[in-house]
Image (spheres, grey):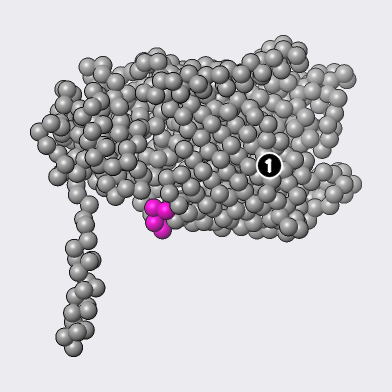
Amino acid sequence: MRAIRALMLLCVCPVLFSPIVQAQYIVTHPSNDTKHISASTLRAIFSMRINEWPDGTPITVFVLDKDSKQHDEFCKNVLQIFPYQLQRTWNRLVFSGSGQAPKRVKSIAEMKNSILSTPGAIGYLPEDTIDENIRILSVQ
Amino acid sequence: MKTFEFYRFSSLPESCRRTRQALLLALGLLYLPICIANEHASQIHGFISQGYTYTSANNFHGDSQNNGSFDFREVGVNSSYRFNQRSFVSGQILSNKAGSSSNGDLSVDFLLLDYRLVTTNHTRTGIQIGRVKNPFGFYNETRDVPFTRPSIILPQSIYFDRTRDLTLSSDGLHVYSSLDLPSSVLRAQLQAARPRINSEKLENILFKTDTSNEFEAALSYIVKITWEQEGRGLNLALSLAQLNSDYISSGGNGMLRFSPRIFSLQYNTLNWSITGEYARRPFYFDNIPLLPEKQDGESYYLQATWRFTSRLCAVVRRDIAYLDRDDKAGSKREALTGGLTPAYSMFAKDWSLGARYTINTFWEVALENHWVHGTAWLPTEDNPPGQSTKEYWRLLTAQVSFQF
């Protein structure tokens, strides 16, 4: 009986303690002046319709792989667009010659480094990677 | 008797056209290394796919009966180079092999300069000059790109593959404008350009044989308005086109006008989407022997896609095509041709079921089956007159694709 209970606990534990995807924050290069952004403008940036900040600095968009849970979380809860809709938009731009795709990075660490080293960059990071070096953009 | 007026351009001599084509191809190939040199401002993308098609009767993608055909291959490479925030140049080279209907030759799919004229907080307006993709329906602009399609074969009632060449892109001017709304985008596109008409291909479709006369493209127009909700919601589009072509014949010149109207509607949720498109496809033939003055085609489909996971999705579709609204059963055409043209070649009703699996960022595989009644969209080159066709047939196709 005790053995069965122990076995059940062992099976349930991984589910209870499986990693929950952290909330994603919009992050930009430290030199970026913009502090707040509307949801609609944010979607226009990640859909590659807007390509420069109000001060004229070119925007470079960084995203994780479409398979990544962080990307999924960012699309659904911050951008409020389905990941497949965003991918569809990027494909249409690239394969009809009407625009370019965002820059894809392979990891959260690479995302952070890219944002810090590219003036005008925008991307997203989980809460625990954010420090005083990086700037957060809040959605109005 | 002329029933309408056209705006005509004088047709270019054949040698001039070939030179223009060769120049375009050379430009397209040459500017790729320029893009590779400057990594920040440039991007390169592409795709390769290989398909296998088996049909229980009739031929599609080559000799697909008996053991099936591997004669279906798509290859494309594109690149773009951004000069500044207002302008960039982009180009794509394509090869499409589909049995005898598409020969796999390299061609310049698009090569254009994009210039943003006006930018405000919520709008962007610009122009594209060069060879531009024809915008109509939900899928035409990226119809040759396997992972942008809802299924391996696009709904044939609207995106006929046998006349694919004519629909790809045109040489001229394209104007676009978009407006950001709180949770949707409104887009308008207007195009005035000369389509790429392959006369031999068009003659095969219309006359079932190559003739000594020529179809030559004339200035044509497309308008497309799109309204797309971001997140759960609708996607609506209206596409109107007027494709004009001169008919040069020793027996007196004529004109062809094709004026399709396509209404497109889609509802998207996280896990599923429903898509429907309806098209009226009127052809007007002026002074072209053997063809009626007008033939009005009608097409529509309804499609449901279910995304089980982010990697696996399934699609089911009912697709109906009538080549002539006034002869939906095809019996008039059969009587007119003394039985040479079977009634079932004037329509096609297709049930299809398919699935797609994304292996990783680069690889995808797909499989689908079509149960078809009618042969309206069978490619003439794979099914020459003289070879018998069957009214009811099945098409099974599988495809592996690679993208970067």
**Closer to the camera, A95 or B251?**
A95
Say if B144 sits above or below B127 in the image.
below
Does residue B134 show up magenta in the picture? Answer: no
Q: Secondary structure at mark 1?
A: strand
| Subunit ID for the residue under disc 1 | B
User: Residues in magenta?
Assistant: B306-311
Residue B210 picture location, percent across and down: 83, 31
Q: Residue at x 63, y 15 (%)?
A: B23
Q: Is residue A61 visible?
A: yes
Say if B379 sits above or below A140 in the image.
below
Local crowd size for mark 1, using a 10 Å CA cut-off: few (<14), some (14–19), many (≥20): many
**Disc 1: which residue:** B98
Q: Residue at x 27, y 37 (%)?
A: A110
Say if B153 sits above or below B84 in the image.
below
- Residue extending farthest bottom: A1
- Residue B212 occupies quadrant: top right
Q: Is residue B331 left or right of residue B404?
A: right
- Residue B187 occupies quadrant: top left
Decide whether the magenta segment is chiefly helix, strand or loop: loop
Q: Is residue B179 visible?
A: no
Q: Residue at x 85, y 44 (%)?
A: B385
Q: Look at label 1 and name its amino acid.
A: Ala
Residue A42 picture location, percent across and down: 26, 33
Q: Residue at x 30, y 27 (%)?
A: A60
